[in-house]
Image (cartoon, rainbow, N blue to C red):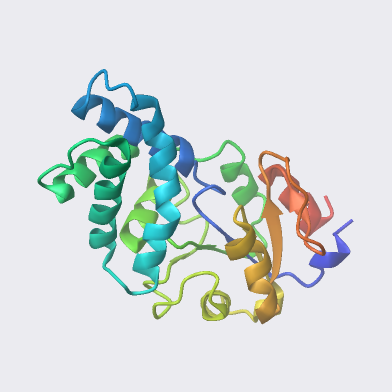
Amino acid sequence: MTDPLLYGIKGVLFDLDGTLFDHRSAADAGIAAWFADRFPGHPRQDEAAGIWAALEVPYLAMWQSGRCTVQEQRRLRFAALCEQLAVPAPDDLDAAYAEFAARYRQSWAAFPDAAGTVAALGGFALGVLTNGAQRMQEEKVRTIGLHGLVGPVLTGETLDGHFKPSPAAYTGAAAALGLAPREVLLVGDDVTNDVTGPAVTGMRSLWLDRLGAERPPAGFPRITSLKELAPLLTGG
């Protein structure tokens, strides 16, 4: 039986990083490998991944708000990482990011429940709504085998500069599917961007809490695996 909260859904938007794509594992492996190559045997080597992860949100927000370019935020984030670890920053920060990105790509993978879930939703309009950089997010979708299966990849760069949680990001993404926001379900792992943010537009949302360790915001359903999604929508 279809979940009553999901009646009338005709389209599904997926977040990418943390939802379909295992960004955290790949980023942790990439930055750990870069740091170990640059500073072998450094006593704070084990801290690099955690610091890099913590720096993502504020520096990506700088880019998304228009205060810098995507490449500038990458340079700034690398400089901040080195400062926090008390190591000298590379002279060429662009080259340093490219070295990290190459290692990051080596670990790109979909979550095991992603492909099967997408395949089970053949009757719905599908798309990806992500706050990442357009070219890299499209490359991820191709690399993990979902290109042509999960619909258009929509970012702030294709939505007139509107990133989640801007209401215009949700309405623009729904329009890209040819639907009204109330006919679309957004599935993602970020509470603000993917769960509470869409509500102001009438778009419904489903929180993917893979760790299952927290209570969902009041009034918003939660799943702990994408395998739970199709039965909720199809009544299967």
Quadrant including the N terminus: bottom right
Q: What residue is rendered at 55% in x and 57% in y? A: 15
Residue reaching furthest to the front = 86
Tell me where residue 47 appears, x and y as whole percent.
40, 31
Residue reaching furthest to the left = 91
To which quarter of the image does residue 175 belong?
A: bottom right
In the depicted structure, whether residue 45 falls above or below residue 220: above
Q: Is residue 20 left or right of residue 232?
A: left
Question: Can residue 108 be spotted in the picture?
Answer: no
Q: Please state the total of marks drawn on the protein image.
A: 0
Question: Can residue 194 be spotted in the picture?
Answer: yes
Question: In the depicted view, which residue is nearer to us: 164 or 61?
Answer: 61
Tell me where residue 73 appears, x and y as whole percent.
29, 59
Q: Is residue 119 left or right of residue 223?
A: left
Question: In the depicted view, which residue is nearer to us: 19 or 139?
Answer: 19
Q: What residue is rendered at 79% in x and 65% in y? A: 6
Q: Is residue 97 left or right of residue 181?
A: left
Q: What residue is rendered at 41% in x and 52% in y? A: 56
Question: In the depicted view, which residue is nearer to us: 181 or 165?
Answer: 165
To which quarter of the image does residue 185 belong?
A: bottom right
Q: What residue is rendered at 17% in x and 38% in y? A: 88
Question: In the depicted view, which residue is nearer to us: 181 or 213?
Answer: 213
In the depicted structure, whether residue 19 falls above or below residue 129: above
Tell me where residue 27 appears, x and y as whole percent.
39, 39
Tell me where residue 137 appears, x and y as whole percent.
39, 56
